[in-house]
Image: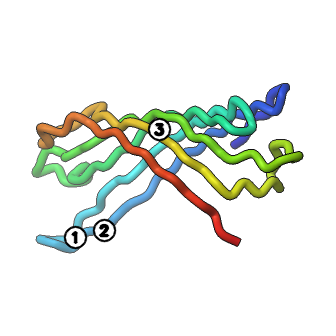
Amino acid sequence: KSFYFPDDMRLDIMGQIGTEIQTHGGIQALLISGAQVMFVASETVRIYVEGNTYMKGFLNEDIKPFSFNTVTFGLKFRERLEGTRFSKESRNRFEAGIGTTIPAHYSYWRYHYGSITGDVNLFMD
């Protein structure tokens, strides 16, 4: 869902939920879910926060569920084409970003202290 504000600012909110079926050692369903909030501060700068969940064993009463939940935040920068304004139709071809991911809550997973990530995307016609 997008919420539009004055001065071409926007807030995008997205959620997702899914499952993965494993057949190793019996059939088991895994829960995969997440949420993202992105604030479009200007035509070129975006600020985002994401949360993700990966959980297995939540339907099995014989074992304690395994879960690994993370929080990610960072910045995205997009190329602004000369003479264009932000719109759904604008064709920004270049995007770069930097962010960090940290574990928010986990069980059975130790010694993961987070990561720093950078990416560059060029969208071709």
Q: Marks 1 and 2: CB-CB under 8 Å?
A: yes
Distance in Å between CA atoms under marks 1 and 3: 30 Å
Q: Residue at x 25, y 69 (%)?
A: 22
Report the quarter where the N terminus lies. Answer: top right
User: Looking at the picture, which amino acid does disc 2 mark?
Assistant: Ile
What x and y, as percent, mark residue 125? 71, 72
Crowd rating for badge 1 (residues with CA inside 10 Å; few <14, some 14–19, many 20+): few
Which residue was labeled with disc 2?
Answer: 21
Q: Residue at x 34, y 39 (%)?
A: 116
On the picture, is 50 further left or further right than 43? left
Which residue was labeled with disc 3?
Answer: 50
Q: Nearer the viewer, mark 2 or mark 3?
A: 3
SS assignment at label 3: strand
Q: Foreground: 72 or 98?
A: 98
> First in sequence: mark 1 or mark 2?
2
Q: Is residue 18 above or below residue 8?
A: below
What x and y, as percent, mark residue 53? 35, 44
